[in-house]
Amino acid sequence: MKKNWKVRPEDKDYQAFLLETNKKLGAFLSFSFNEAMTGDGEFQGIPLAVKDNIAVKNQPLTCASKLLENLVSPYDATVVSRLKDKGAVVIGKTNLDEFGMGSSNQDSALAETFNPWDPLVVPGGSSGGSAAAVAAGMVPLAIGTDTGGSVRQPAMFTGVFGFKPTYGVVSRYGLTAYASSLEVPGFIARSVEWIKLALELTAGADPHDQTTTSDVLAEVRPIKKIGYLKVDDGLSPVMAAAYREHIEAWKDLGYVLMPVDIPALEYAVPAYYTIATAEASANLARFTGIRYGVRPDYAQNPQELVKKARTAGFGREVKRRILLGTYVLRSGFQDQYYHRAQKIRTIIRGDFNRVFEKVDILLMPVYPTQAFPRGESGLSHLQQKLADKFTVGANLTGIPAISIPAGVRDGLPLGFQLLAPALHDRDLIQMAQLWESKTSIPAPPNYPPRWED
Ligand code: GLN
């Protein structure tokens, strides 16, 4: 099956539209309009946007960091090459919070990205550029990465679908590592069919990534029971009301809805940030300014060179996380933090397993609020971390999750997520397609769809 997207990357009007739209949204950090099509297949001539922490040959790979501002990738990530092999053309790289660390795109060191629904609110993050590009109709499909919610949350904030596959199904080769045990490439689209195609074409073991699994995706099961997470507090009033309505909507579609508890979710955020920062402190040690990236003009010795490069190159949030990660890993204290976080991770996995003994699919919020205001009146860094409560569970356990748009309130999109046991990604795609066929997925008023998706 081949999807139809009316414009081609070489179309001059389309390129003008992209440049014009990007002036308003800042979704892309770079465009590459002279990319030749190198493959043939389902994605023939389809323009693709790729988050700028994923390698695309001969295109920038900045990770939205000053340190890598001048880096151009010499190779393709596996997730990119597999889509290129089917004819996709990468038209540009999208903005993110530096190295994927954040939830608003306000922690990008290189550009500001605006939410197509309202320039006063954030697009979400860290794959905010990818989500904004899709929501504004710039591309049919964008690749992001999801370490703790970074595909699902910006998709929700911009009113589109965002899918995080089972860990190990889509190769991480070519993804600039932030927290390797948690993250996966994911897909963002207004139409689920694109996500389905992208998953089918990119899933599968990769010799370049030893964590990819040789297990194949399970066939679609008949879904009857949906468990919904009982949420007593912590949601904004708008989100709480919408959640109740959303649960009713699934009942109206004929499903059995059962309330479920995941008690250990209470500890998910501290466990996530302990593990994520520990892994980040190790992964980001490679950025020394010696082999690649920005290097200082003058240093007396290698140590000073590295220090100068990292001091000038990393943003505040990245430095904070490297410090935190180094702290939780320091010798003598691993039991107190890192090992304890790993134990919590195991308990959370157990909780999810128990839920999936009773229900086929799990439904829960993506985020406690709709897209929040930019700047001071929005959420602080600490508040943003606490708000990752609902998304990090899927990363700690490795299970698949998809965020689905669920209407608009006060001019901003609403959305919720469906989760399934590991390797049951196709169940989620099928449920999202059903949802898509029964509801309307509105576009931002200022960015009406220019072509059939
Ligand atoms: N908000 C989370 C964090 O800052 C998730 C980021 C991500 O998934 N890349 O770590």
Image (cartoon, grey):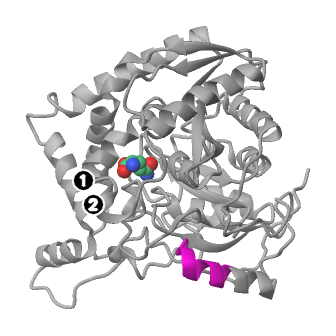
Residue on which disc 1 sits: 321
Residue 311, picture quadrant: bottom left
Camera-nearest residue between 382 and 88:
382
Number of marks present in the image shown = 2
Where disc 2 sits, the SS reads helix
Residue on which disc 2 sits: 318
Residue 360, picture quadrant: top right
- Residue 346 makes an appearance in the image: no
Camera-nearest residue between 236 and 111:
236
Question: Image check: 164 left or right of 331?
Answer: right
- Residue 118: percent from the left, percent from the top? 53, 64
The reply to whether discs 1 and 2 touch (Cβ–Cβ < 8 Å) is: yes
Residue 308, picture quadrant: bottom left
- Residue 182 makes an appearance in the image: yes
Task: Report the residue that reaches farthest toward the right.
Answer: 1
Residue under the point 67% across and 27% down: 424
The quadrant of the picture occupied by the C terminus is bottom right
Number of other residues with Cα within 10 Å of mark 2, as a class: few under 14, some 14 to 19, many 20 or more: many
Question: Image check: 154 left or right of 142?
Answer: left
Confirm whether the magenta stretch covers residue 93. Answer: no
Find residue 15 and name its label: none
Q: In this picture, which residue range is highlighted in magenta?
A: 18-30
Is most of the magenta stretch helix, strand or loop? Answer: helix
Residue under the point 40% across and 76% down: 110
Question: Image check: 11 left or right of 381?
Answer: right
Confirm whether the magenta stretch covers residue 22. Answer: yes
- Residue 164: percent from the left, percent from the top? 58, 42
Question: Image check: 116 left or right of 294?
Answer: right
Where disc 1 sits, the SS reads helix
Q: Is mark 2 within 8 Å of ligand 1?
A: no
Task: Report the residue that reaches farthest toward the top.
Answer: 358
Mark 2 is on which residue type? Val
